Amino acid sequence: MKTPQQITEIFEHHLAMINMPDEPQRLYAPIRYSLAEGGKRMRPVLAMLAYNIYADDVQRVLPAATAIEVFHNFTLLHDDIMDNAAVRRGRPSVFARWGSNVAILSGDVMMIEAYRHLQGVESKYLPEVFECFNSMAARVCEGQQYDMDFETQPKVAVAEYMNMIELKTAALLAGSVVIGATLAGASAEDIQRLNKFATEVGIAFQLQDDLLDSYGDEQLGKKIGGDILEGKKTYLMIISLSHATEAQREVLRSTHLRTDLDDNQKIAAVKEVYDAIGARAMTEQQISVRISRALAILDTLDVPKERTEYMKSYVESLVGRKK
Amino acid sequence: MKTPQQITEIFEHHLAMINMPDEPQRLYAPIRYSLAEGGKRMRPVLAMLAYNIYADDVQRVLPAATAIEVFHNFTLLHDDIMDNAAVRRGRPSVFARWGSNVAILSGDVMMIEAYRHLQGVESKYLPEVFECFNSMAARVCEGQQYDMDFETQPKVAVAEYMNMIELKTAALLAGSVVIGATLAGASAEDIQRLNKFATEVGIAFQLQDDLLDSYGDEQLGKKIGGDILEGKKTYLMIISLSHATEAQREVLRSTHLRTDLDDNQKIAAVKEVYDAIGARAMTEQQISVRISRALAILDTLDVPKERTEYMKSYVESLVGRKK
């Protein structure tokens, strides 16, 4: 078995070797730029770790894992246009650097690139993996649409929010793990269990992401409070709204629009309400419940327990339980 | 064998029956809207006609043909954003009706929809068809990028233009025909010939499209002269520039920017240069050469001649040789 670290290195090495055409330059340069900038490679690593629970030659997952990573980066590229986001992972977004038309079209070709990598899946598994990939891809877009719908929706229920992140974030993690296990020939029952496992992980990961935006470590290079300044309907905001008094609700709803406060004052005002309600603790509690449930599912797989150790430690590291 | 008319009806019937989710409404409504509005269904019909040269149960092509048609309509949806086009087939474009974010995301999910239809291809043929589809899809995007690059490029050579339309328009027609023939079990030699055939047809079709924009029939409901008013580098423009005197070149390059002329005067001024150079006749000549070459290729296929009759008549109808 391979450690998450080893698997990440195998994947990075593979990704660095992939070929793309040079021309038209304005079409392919943004794709190279997007893929070169790192990120955790969480989805391909999860696919390979899932495979590695059942079989050792993790290289067999590389074409599908690459397809997933390219697809994920394509979604970020298009999301940045829709969110008017100038920065991605500390660098100018493709949208900011090349403009919206180039970002649309290079995103399109990046999705096609993702499917091209899927061609590398052995033909025996191709129909099943293809179907899973398509379904996962559509769910990600559905989640993004709900997320955009929320912006203009006066009230978002917690259940609606959970459904949205299950689509937007968890579907891709679940698809990754399912594809990895499928390629390893796992049983239908285990694939079903892993699907549930990764859905819980995905939801926890998104909640963690929401939490970090308001309570994260400035040293990670990420600006704190971006979501608050945008008035974004994150989990913190939605559970706070559902527990707030009328006066607190007013603060949550309108602080980001006030012109008499500076950014730090706005962030402080909203976090004061979060803290009064206990939103941070409730979010941490949700994350903890989801991760515990996910880890418990791993114990029900039809494999010796030690086969799931690396998956467990990787998932715990994702939500900061340990490094 | 089935007539092009019968094949079009079979395809329309199939397309009308396809299911898509209802929610999120803002994601799937634009896709329904795009697919419902008709068009000639040229690409799926070509795929089915190509199949029908070799085998009779044309229904077998429907999943792949639908994938191609959905993909084609996806490209139009995103092109309309990039071209800032408010009208498509006489109705508001998705971009104009729902805005650019909805158009980006519903376009993305439409591409995924296209791939979902491809799942319906028998697994025996899936790897080959999948590869062909991906390659065709990437070529279409490359063509669109070159077309956008031309807008800011001071000089476009005829060969560059031909390469662009081979990618942007002909690749999809060629891919359609190749996929149809592949599913029918045609020989590699015949598939190669049909690829060449459809590439010629696609180039002729695009030149015809350029011609109709300046010399078309107003009764078809299309405004004449749109390309001239945009200063678009069409085939007419590019061959005219390559034959023009200095004075004519000035007219071709700057008329669309003049504020002292109304639209009709601008169109008349540019067409006067086209006519003096003989651009219309040269374009018609190119179309004729390409179509003759295409039809001659059909005669080299390893089938009885009568199997290609409907394909011939369909292609001739596409460029107005007969109805």
Image (cartoon, coloured by chain):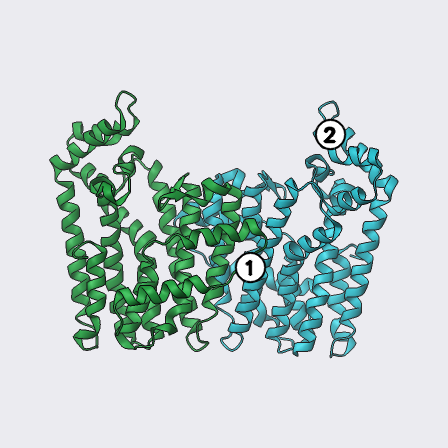
Chain colours: A green, B cyan
The quadrant of the rendering that contains the N terminus of chain A is bottom left
The image quarter in which residue A216 lies: top left
The image quarter in which residue A54 lies: bottom left
Same chain letter for marks 1 and 2: no
Residue bearing the label numbered 2: B263
Closer to us: B312 or A207: A207
* Tags 1 and 2 touching, CB below 8 Å: no
Q: Chain of mark 1?
A: A
Q: Chain of mark 2?
A: B
> How many C-alpha atoms fall within 10 Å of the one at disc 1: few (<14), some, or many (≥20)?
few
> How many marks overall?
2
Instruction: Name the residue located 39 percent from the left edge and 69 percent from the top edge.
Output: A62
Residue A91 appears in view: yes
Q: Position of residue A20 (x, y in %)?
A: 52, 60
Amino acid residing under circle 1: Pro
Distance from label 1 to label 2 (Cα)?
41 Å
Instruction: Name the residue located 55 percent from the left edge and 47 percent from the top edge.
Output: B77
Q: Position of residue A169 (x, y in %)?
A: 31, 53
> Above or below — where is B296 with respect to B249?
below
> Above or below — where is A283 with respect to A232?
below
Instruction: Name the residue located 47 percent from the left edge and 41 percent from the top edge.
Output: A97
Q: In the figure, is residue B79 to the left or right of A236?
A: right
Residue bearing the label numbered 1: A21
As drawn, the label of residue B220 is none
Q: Position of residue B235 (x, y in %)?
A: 75, 47
Nearer the observer: mark 1 or 2; the answer is 1
Amino acid residing under circle 2: Asp
- Kindly state the secondary structure of the residue where label 1 is placed: loop
Q: In the figure, is residue A92 to the left or right of A29?
A: left
Closer to us: A153 or A94: A94
